[in-house]
Amino acid sequence: MQLRTLSFADAMLRIHRALEDQGVVVFTLSGRIRSEEAAELRRLVRAENQKVILDLNEVRLVDRAAIAFLAQCQAEGVRLRNAPAYIQEWVNRETVARATTALPQDSN
């Protein structure tokens, strides 16, 4: 198990890394996720060779960059566990928005 605390100005994100059964890596997050923290999380997630779960139970504040990051993670197969309802709803909306903008436009 590893515990990492990231501190950016007035923001703080705690990251706890644990290995579950079947080699699944779980990052338990608490605090705030903003663009700076999302960049660090992206690096951590990409460094893993196993299945990854982000446990968001103790996340209290996110910004748009964090939502974009979480939506991208989910699209790439990272499971979001225990996400507060408002975060999951925002991620779902971001996912739909990305799918809508990715559709080819009809030329007629």
Image (cartoon, rainbow, N blue to C red):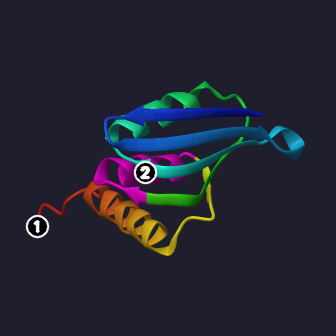
The secondary structure type at the circle numbered 1 is loop
Q: Which sits in the foreground, 100 or 75?
A: 75
The spot of residue 78 in percent (x, y) is 60, 48
Query: Quick check: 77 above or below 94?
Result: above
Q: Main secondary structure of the magenta part?
A: helix
Front disc: 1 or 2: 2
The spot of residue 42 in percent (x, y) is 48, 34
Q: CA distance from mark 1 to mark 2?
A: 45 Å
From the image, tell me which residue sits under label 2. Answer: 32
Magenta segment includes 63: yes
* Mark 1 vs 2: CB contact within 8 A: no
Give the quarter of the figure containing the C terminus. Answer: bottom left
Q: Which sits in the foreground, 23 or 31?
A: 31
Residue shown at the point (31%, 35%) measured from the top left:
9
Q: Name which residue type carries label 2.
A: Arg
Query: Quick check: 55 above or below 84?
Result: above
Residue shown at the point (43%, 51%) measured from the top left:
32
From the image, tell me which residue sits under label 1. Answer: 108
Residue shown at the point (48%, 68%) measured from the top left:
88
Q: Name which residue type carries label 1.
A: Asn
Query: Quick check: 96 above or below 31?
Result: below
Q: In which quarter of the view is residue 82 placed?
A: bottom right
Question: Where are the magenta residues, as a range?
Answer: 61-76
Magenta segment includes 70: yes
Farthest residue toward the front? 10
The spot of residue 40 in percent (x, y) is 46, 31
